[in-house]
Amino acid sequence: MTDKEKYLKLMLRYWEAETTPGEERELSQYVASTTDPEFDEIRGVMGYLSIGREREAKRVRTIRAYSFATVVACAVLVAIIGLNIRDARLMQEKDICVSYYYGEKINDDGAIMNSVESSLSDFFGKSAN
């Protein structure tokens, strides 16, 4: 049996979906290397399927890249939100009342409240009691 006869039989088995992946690779290598017109149809089909597999592999890689980018973006977002929540809690624990009276910084809550009451009583013309 010649190579051509062997590959013609293999081609018939391929059309019947009875070939193994190894036989398909062997057939595709032979078909790519021959110019025999009897193999034109299978050359076209195998070339088309080969391009389809390549495109599918690229699509899968692209989806994986987008998935990785999405995971990284979500992790950064969670970290930013966590830091903001932590900072907000720290600020709530440290409620500080500060007032500036004639350029002087006042931190004493009692003195600040007296100053506010005095300003309000002057504004409304009533006593602060």
Image (cartoon, rainbow, N blue to C red):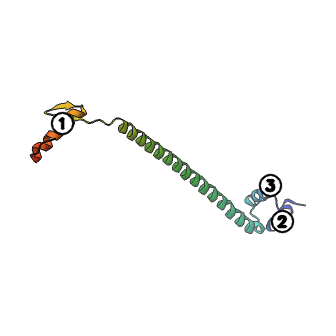
**Badge number at residue 114:** 1
Crowd band around label 1 with a 10 angstrom C-alpha radius: few (<14), some (14–19), many (20+) = few
Q: Earlier in the sequence, mark 1 or mark 2?
A: 2
Q: Residue at x 13, y 41 (%)?
A: 119
- What residue occupies the far front of the structure in this picture? 129
Question: SS of the residue at dot 1?
Answer: helix
Residue at 29% from the left image edge and 35% from the top image edge: 96
In the image, which is nearer the foreground, mark 1 or mark 2? 1
Callout 3 crowding tier (Cα within 10 Å): few <14, some 14–19, many ≥20: few
Q: Nearer the viewer, mark 3 or mark 1?
A: 1
Residue 113, relative to residue 2: is it above or below? above
Q: Nearer the viewer, residue 58 or 110?
A: 110
| 10 Å crowding of disc 2: few (<14), some (14-19), many (20+) | some
Mark 3 vs 2, N-terminal side: 2
Q: Which mark is residue 73?
A: none
Q: Residue at x 35, y 38 (%)?
A: 91
Given the image, on which type of amino acid does mark 3 rest? Gly
Amino acid carrying label 2: it is Arg
Q: Quadrant of the C terminus?
A: top left
Q: Which residue is mark 3?
A: 22
Report which residue position mark 2 lands on: 13
* Residue 18 x %, y %: 83, 64
- Give x and y (percent) for residue 117: 17, 40
On screen, residue 1 versus residue 70, left or right, reads: right
SS label for mark 2: helix
Q: Quadrant of the N terminus?
A: bottom right
Left or right, residue 60 beside residue 126: right
Number of callouts:
3
